[in-house]
Image (cartoon, grey):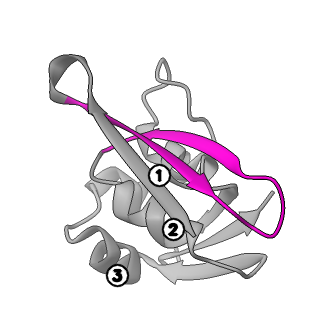
């Protein structure tokens, strides 16, 4: 079960607070709504320890193409979510409780629960 509450914050960005109930105490997670929010939501529904998605499947989830750098550099898939580093996409999987392990050659990402 998930409840979502949105409120407007500066510069037109929305902050979404999601509460998940997983047979125990609820966890509160905060993620900015971005183009990666659909991936975040998909991973929140995942019950398995890991999920393997192709780049094409991720693009279908997002409803848009991944940037060229996602296809060229494993660094784009790094598990660094600080706003300073500029890896806002990593927040999608890290806030959902996963770490990404990408293969540029195979065009696939394995998200493993932490």
Residue wearing tag 3: 56
Residue wearing tag 2: 104
Residue at figure coordinates x 19%, y 67% from the top left: 64
For the record, the magenta segment spans: 13-33
The answer to whether residue 29 is above or below residue 15 is below
Query: Disc 2 and disc 3: Cα gap in Å?
Result: 12 Å
Residue at figure coordinates x 81%, y 53% from the top left: 25
Instruction: Indicate yes or no whether the magenta region holds residue 30.
Output: yes
Query: What element does badge 1 sit on?
Result: loop
> Residue 5 placed where, x, y %?
38, 45
Residue wearing tag 1: 73
The answer to whether residue 86 is above or below residue 56 is above
Task: Give the prevailing secondary structure in the magenta stretch.
Answer: strand
Q: Nearer the viewer, residue 114 or 44?
A: 44
For residue 109, what is the image quadrant?
A: bottom right
For residue 45, what is the image quadrant?
A: bottom right
Query: What element does badge 3 sit on?
Result: helix
Residue 57: which disc?
A: none
Residue at figure coordinates x 81%, y 57% from the top left: 114
Q: Nearer the viewer, residue 75 or 12?
A: 12
Question: What is the crowding at mark 3: few (fewer than 14 residues within 10 Å), some, or many (at least 20)?
Answer: some
Marks 1, 3: nearer the viewer: 3
N-terminal of the pair, mark 2 or mark 1, is 1
> Residue 55 placed where, x, y %?
40, 75
N-terminal of the pair, mark 2 or mark 3, is 3
Query: Disc 2 and disc 1: Cα gap in Å?
Result: 7 Å
Q: Is residue 106 visible?
A: no
Instruction: Indicate yes or no whether the magenta region holds residue 68.
Output: no
**Would you say 98 lies left or right of 4 here?**
right
N-terminal of the pair, mark 1 or mark 3, is 3
> Residue 15 placed where, x, y %?
36, 34
**Would you say 17 lies left or right of 14 here?**
right
């Amino acid at each position: 079960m998930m409840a979502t509450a949105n409120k407007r914050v500066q510069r037109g960005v929305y902050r979404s607070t999601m509460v998940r109930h997983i047979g125990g105490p609820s966890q509160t997670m905060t993620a900015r709504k971005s183009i990666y929010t659909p991936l975040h939501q998909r991973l929140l529904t995942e019950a398995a320890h890991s999920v393997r998605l192709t780049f094409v499947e991720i693009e279908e989830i997002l409803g848009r193409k991944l940037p060229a750098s996602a296809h060229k550099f494993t660094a784009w898939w790094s598990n660094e979510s600080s706003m300073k580093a500029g890896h806002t996409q990593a927040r999608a999987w890290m806030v959902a409780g996963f770490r990404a392990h990408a293969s540029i050659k195979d065009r696939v990402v394995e998200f493993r629960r932490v």
